[in-house]
Image (cartoon, coloured by chain):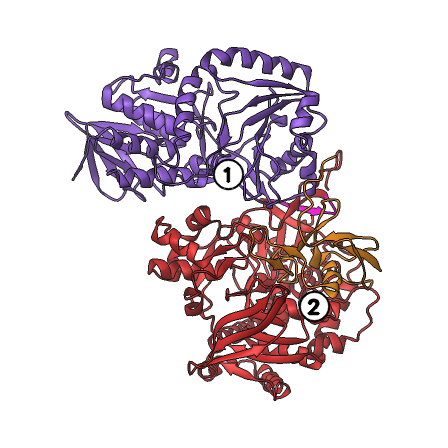
Chain colours: A red, B orange, C purple
Amino acid sequence: MAAPRVVIVGAGPAGVRAAERLVAAGLRPTVVDEGMRAGGQIYRQQPPGFTRRPEELYGTEAGRAVAVHGAFAALAGRIDYLPETLAWNIEPGLLHVARDGVARKLPYDAVILATGATDRLLPVPGWTRAGVYSLGGSQVSLKAQACAIGARVAFLGTGPLLYLVASQYLKAGVEVAAVLDTSPASARFKALPLMASRPGLLVKGAALMWKLRGVPILRGVTPLAIDGDDSGVTGIRVKDAGGREHRFAADAVAMGWHLRPETQLADLAGVPFEHDALSGLWMAQVQADGRTAVKGVYLAGDGARILGADGAEIAGTLAATSVLADHGIQVPVAEVVELIGRRAVMDRFRRGLLRAFPWPGHLAAAVPDDTLLCRCEAITAGELRRSASDLGAPEVNRAKALTRVGMGRCQGRYCGPAGQEILAAARGVALPEVGRLRGQAPVKPLSIATVVPLGVEDA
Amino acid sequence: MGLVIDGEPATALAGDTLLTAVLTNGRQLRVSEFGDGARAGFCLMGACQDCWVYTEDGDRLRACSTPVAEGMRIVTKGATWPRLG
Amino acid sequence: MHQSDVIVVGGGLMGAATAFFLRKRGLSVTLLERGLCGQQASGTNFGNVRRQGRFLPQLPLANRSREIWGRLPELIGEDVEFIRTGHLRVGYRPEHVGMMEAYRDNAAPYGLELELISANALRERFPFIGPEAIAGSYSPNDGHANPRLSAPAFARAATRAGAKVVENCEVISIERGVEDFRVETKTGDIYRAPMVQVSAGAWGGRMAAAMGEPVPIQVKGPQMGVTEPVPYAITPVLGVTTKDLPEVIYARQVTRGNIVFGGVGHGPADLDTIRARVRPEVTLQQFGQLKRIVPALAKLNIIRVWSGIEGYMRDDIPVMGPSAKVPGLFYAFGFCGAGFQLGPGVGDVMAELIATGATTTPIEPFSIARFAEKA
């Protein structure tokens, strides 16, 4: 039996560990990654010439980051690595990629989609102003560019990342105007039983709160508006849990409500989706070992389930073992059992986090009519609601066709989750009933200058 | 590194993304096509597509994932497409 | 029990417009749509309101339809973004110029005036056109509209005019009784009417076959794409006069700025899974043709591709008119990827035919009888 051709999309923790495991089994996988260097977003490497130490870049996770970078470096010469390459489309057995204006087809017997995650967003009046950034992006800016998004930054959203990035900004010498959490303090106690699955992380969380002492922290807030003028952000207004309004002067806002998996390729590959009631998100159906209902298509890392970077490493190795097993290459049973066990602990913690820091669907549904929902096409929440009330749109794809919400450059990545809430509320139906935006190629904008080189046949 | 932003000379550090380079020199990257004002990027990781800028030649660059290069000529206050003969 | 004068099966642009015009003529009408109105061919096509280049015997119908497009939005009370922009086809080789001249001469008796433009004038008037184009044929009164909005808007207008429009209601059988047709739906409902129109697009072939009139129909998907929004610079709808499918490209810019395009080939479509796919290699081939017709497009990105389910007849001519076998049964389907412009006219003509038994616009070339004769 010929060695299977395996393509991995993504060189973050999941993709790197998947490649490592395949190489260990004697395969030579192809790794396609949009980034210039491996590491993904979480362990994003600084550009050549930047010389900050790992501890400065990755904090308490420096050890893991160095290990992942080291693991990838050790694979040099034993994988085919295509950096700065966009996987823009997929068909059965063929991954379509483009790099520097040249398109290629990569035939595969197995493809591991380790596509990572992006911030999950909620529109707030003023969120399109210059100076408002995604929470994850604000962290990337600090890590990869040694650059803060502002001199006095307010943090809005929920989840551990909110506090983590705020503390990183503080440490970098940036003034943190406030940390504004939409989750009520009470949610955290209810989630303790699940979160106790990873006591170490709970301790890290407590340490984080200590670092943020002195910073105004409000829980259970309702965002009102991000204020600004022609040049950008000037402040943020929220209502606290008791209904009192607060305003914080700031020249930048970082906002995010957990992460959402990047599932475009899985969707285009035909992987079925299911609605996850806990997160309110549509998720690609995937087994703990990375297998999907589509032959040859495997998912790993935050692109499948948001387990964090260490969980992604496990998921990457697991997906690789599934690929190996499916192609008749022996994998020790004990290895798989152990990995699945560790993954289960992380999944339990993930569910705890979602309870402790719940997605505020009610806030999404209550976004004012004149607030821009779709950043790309500048479509307001009210226009989406009118597609339900006046035009009878029963689900999000119809609403998209009628209003353009989700039709822009980002393909609904940033308006999709909130748009579902708004449409469901406008129709008075449960969230799953309005469906999800179907994926459409290209996964990201593709230049018309892209050419198919003549006479080049891929192996 | 030298570049030109809206006709004005500007400087940037090697290793900067184009986004960092432009925003170190000003507060906007582009103007929304639909009349709702200036934009300065959002996700900073190549996903939201809200940081595409024009060059003086009408080329399109995603600022957050493009390394700044010597001599780039960037337009943030309008569109330069199509530039015809 | 649901009774009406007419049952329209299929809520694409043809069916929705027919329902609307039947109400204008005072007939009671029930429209049964399997999914949502205008989801497939009607909603996913290019949006061309083009007469230039059509099969000549189709021009009277196309002219009637163009006249109706010109009365929107007043006629239906909703804007479907129709604008008269002109339609420009270019040719790359001398034989294309010959084709353009012949078509211009043959279309003139039908009242379609086309202007042939030389290479120099072409670039002067339309400076974005690429250097390979050696001539153009310009139809000043053609234009484009938004297909995503059009069929739903006609369906809502029909509803406001008193039609009963039922969505999510798949027809599973049509039977001719003594007085009425009996139409049964998957939802278990029975609808009755003395007249039925099948305007079920690519699914029309199965229904016609079930009524004893099989037709040679192939199911395919258009290969569409759209660029990011850029300043409005390309006014006319663009196309190519050629016999070679690989160099067929069509493009139009909406006033918001995006440039919609299609061409080069088709993709697979499936009536049972209700899915149509864009072949990635077609998208890449389209890039080559886009750069050829408008070189400045090389600067832009595409942000989305899509397809839908279209029915193509073997002879590339739609099926439209009365059944040759079953009294009271009418057809309007199989528009071969070129039905959008015709839609309002088809609705008007079919309503006329159903209400009066005759049409003032010739539709004989589209009769389903042409397939029976050959059999």
Subunit under mark 1: C
Magenta part, dominant SS: strand
Q: Quadrant of the N terminus of chain C?
A: top left
Subunit under mark 2: A
Q: In this rendering, do the residues under marks 1 and 2 share a single chain? A: no
Q: Which residue is mark 1?
A: C307
Characterize the local packing of mark 2: few (<14), some (14-19) or many (20 or more) Cα atoms within 10 angstroms. Answer: many
Q: Is residue C205 visible?
A: no
Where is A399 relative to A352, above or below?
above
Q: Which residue is mark 2?
A: A141
The verdict on residue C113 being magenta is no
Q: Which residues fall within the magenta stretch?
A: A93-101
Characterize the local packing of mark 1: few (<14), some (14-19) or many (20 or more) Cα atoms within 10 angstroms. Answer: many
Q: Specify the quadrant of the image occupied by residue C161.
A: top left
Q: Secondary structure at mark 2?
A: helix
In the image, C126: left or right of B9?
A: left
